[in-house]
Amino acid sequence: MDIESIRNICTGLPYVTEDIKWEKDLCFLIGNKMFCVANLELPLTVSFKVPNDAFADLCNLPGIVPAPYVARYSWILVEDTSRFTSKQWEHYIMQSYNLVKEKLPKKVLTQLN
C-alpha cells in the first residue's frame, strides 16, 4: 500500500478534507475530526481508529502497534502497510471514518449534509 492509494480511499469518502499536521503527517478529516493519519516520511505508516473490542487483537498482529498519544481512543499504528490487502485497507479506513463520523455533534452532521 502506498500513500496515493491511502489518499484515494480516504478522499473517496463523503465530506473528507485533508490537512498537513506536525509538518509530516497527512491527516484525513470528517467534520474537522481526524479518522486517518499517514506519515509522509518513509517508511509509510498509517494510523486510524478501530472498534474498542478489536483494538487488542489488532495490536497483537505483527507490524501493528497502539498509536502513540491516541491509543487510549482505540487508534492503531500500522507500521507495515503490506499487513493488509487493499480490501482490508478499504474496510478499516471506512470503519474508522464511520466511528469518527457517528461521534460528531448533530449540528456538524447537519452542516455536512
Image (cartoon, grey):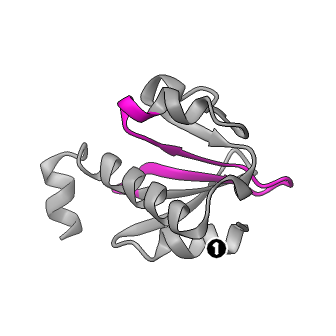
- Kind of residue at badge 1: Ser
Vertical side of 75 occupied by 15: above or below? below
Q: Secondary structure at mark 1?
A: helix
Residue beneath the point at 49% across and 66% down: 90
Residue 31 vertical placement versus 13 (above, below) = above
Q: Residue at x 19, y 45 (%)?
A: 105
Residue drawn at x 19%, y 64% is 111
Q: Is residue 70 visible?
A: yes
- Rendering coords of residue 96 (x, y %): 41, 50
- Looking at the rendering, in which quadrant would you find the C terminus? bottom left
Q: Residues within 10 Å of mark 1 (few under 14, many from 20)?
A: few
Query: Residue 106 vs residue 55: left or right?
Result: left
**Which is nearer the eye, 17 or 70?**
70
- Where does the image place residue 110, in percent across and percent down from the top left? 14, 62
Q: Quadrant of residue 42?
A: bottom right
In the displayed structure, 65 sits above or below 111; it is: above
- Decide if residue 32 is in sight here: no
Q: Say which residue label 1 marks.
A: 5
| Closer-to-camera residue (106/10) | 10
* Extreme residue in the top direction: 72
Residue beneath the point at 29% across and 52% down: 101
Q: Horizontal and vertical percent for residue 14?
A: 34, 73
> Is 63 within the magenta?
no
Q: Is residue 47 magenta?
A: yes
The residue range painted magenta reads: 30-54
